[in-house]
Amino acid sequence: MSLSPDLLARIRAASDEHGGPRAAMLEALKLIQHEHGWVSDAHLAEAASALGVHRAEMEALASFYSLIFRHPVGKTVILLCDGASCWLNGAEEVREELKRRLGIGFGETTRDGRYTLLNVACLGGCDRAPAAVVGRDRRLVGPLSPAGVAALLEDGL
């Protein structure tokens, strides 16, 4: 599967908008991930070619950022904060309820491909602790509670 002509055009345009090919590499990865859900090796190589940069440069950048997914993820990614404020406000109980309801652990995807659960060091949502970021639009939600996990999942994330 190759990148669409429209996506390739947006990647090339990002080079002009961001000050050159190297400055546009992260934007290219984000564009690919937004359209496909993750960045495959083939897509990474196509983007590198479109920008005129070495594939190794794109790979180094993609592997540096933990929120650039290099393997398929679920339709909805749930990033659960593991920061101090969230931990102190009950994140452990929320984490266990999410794992129980989804039947997966961190770094795993449900069998139906609907959810991937990831823990992150901090989301910067301390005022909503415990917090999570969900979905492609990266919506910050919280404060979460074990009782509210069912509603969060049923909300059609």
Image: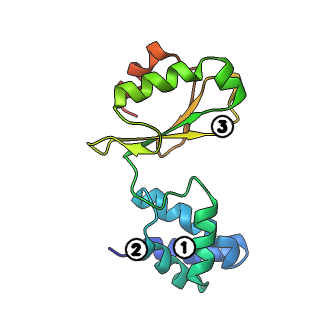
CB of mark 1 within 8 Å of CB of mark 2?
yes
Mark sitting on residue 123: 3
Check the image and report above or below for 60 versus 151: below
Cα separation, mark 1 vs mark 3, equals: 28 Å
Say whether residue 109 is left or right of residue 138.
Answer: left
Q: Which amino acid does label 1 sit on?
A: Ile
Q: What residue type is labelled 3?
A: Leu
The quadrant in which residue 130 appears is top right
Return the x and y of residue 140 as percentages of the image width and height: 58, 33
Check the image and report above or below for 83 versus 147: below
Give the residue at mark 1.
11
**SS for dot 3:** loop
Mark sitting on residue 3: 2
| Front in this rendered view, residue 74 or 104 | 104
Say whether residue 27 is left or right of residue 76.
Answer: right
Q: Which amino acid does label 2 sit on?
A: Leu
Return the x and y of residue 142 as percentages of the image width and height: 58, 23
Residue positioned 48% across, 65% down in the render = 32
Cα separation, mark 1 vs mark 2, equals: 10 Å
Return the x and y of residue 110 as percentages of the image width and height: 32, 40
Q: Residues within 10 Å of mark 3 (few under 14, many from 20)?
A: some
Cα separation, mark 2 vs mark 3, equals: 31 Å
